[in-house]
Image (cartoon, helix red, strand yellow):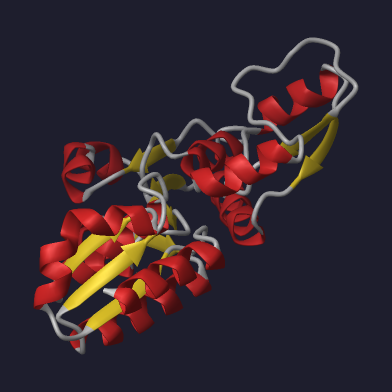
Amino acid sequence: MIHNSHVIKELEQIGINTVDELPENENGICIVRSHGMPPLKIKEMQDKGFEVIDLTCPDVKKVQQKAIQLAQEGYLVIILGKPEHPEVIAIEANAKMYSDNVIVVPDIEYLKLNEEKIKSNKKIGIVIQTTQKIEFLKEIIDYLLPVTTELKIFNTICKSTSMRQEEARKLAKESDLMIVVGSKKSANTTHLAEILSSITNTIHIETKEDLVKYMQLIKEVKNIGVAAGASTPENIINEVISELEKI
């Protein structure tokens, strides 16, 4: 349900399995992941006989609702985020239920390639993937302001993501090395590592076993800071800290 392989394994041990394709005519329970899913996919679950439990994160639901609102109000909907990320796929699918005037923008270069499309629309609306960086949103706004007549912006970055990034920045300024713990598939964890690497020496690991690759570096520094992504289990973080204390 989240991007952490250890959590997924724990769920499998109690009988909750991940599927890529839905089997036909089942009577079981189908859980919608925290990143959300396209509405037609949820309908397919129901049509095939599953009981559907929607565990979409409330913050992600909010982005979907804002994207739908912009689409209904006739805006060109710009979704800032990674096109292949399940959260963004679901946001886009929700908006496209009401309008085809929707684009996903992964970076400023992609936006520049679509400048003519943007200029041809009088009304531009923005939502952003919950785990993106505030710097990305600011960069896009700065670029769009001179080329648009009406710009509506919803800052839909998750509050806990923003707080985590800010606290980690403070810690990084006091540290010779930052260790970010969490899945390499997790967007908020990888963004955290990117932010901190511009402040101090930073490594991104998934478990305490990964520390062996950086043993020499760890032994050379004095102050080490530890941060983690939203989907990283507390026991994994504590194991990393305990291992560092031993070293």
Count of number-bearing discs: 0
Residue 68, above or below 83: below
Task: Give the left or right position of residue 108, taking residue 81 as reference.
Answer: left
Name the quadrant containing residue 96: top right
Residue in front for this viewpoint, 115 or 6: 6
| Quarter the N terminus occupies | top right
**Residue at point 23% right, 38% down?**
114
- Which residue is located at x 75 percent, y 21 percent? 44
Q: Nearer the viewer, residue 84 or 66?
A: 84
Decide if residue 56 is in sight here.
yes
> Which percent across, then down, holds residue 209?
34, 53
Q: Is residue 195 above or below residue 2?
A: below
- Quarter of the picture containing the C terminus is bottom left
Q: Residue at x 50, y 36 (%)?
A: 89
Closest to the observer: 199 or 133?
Answer: 199
In the rendered image, the residue lying farthest to the top is: 24
Q: Quadrant of residue 9?
A: top right
Q: Position of residue 229 (x, y in %)?
A: 43, 63
Residue 7, x across and y down, in percent: 59, 49
Q: From the top left corner, tell me how far across and down residue 5 is, in percent.
A: 50, 43
- Towards the viewer: 168 or 61: 168
Viewer can see residue 1: no
| Left or right: 70, with 218 as reference point | right
130 displayed left or right of 23? left
What is the quadrant of residue 139 in the picture?
A: bottom left
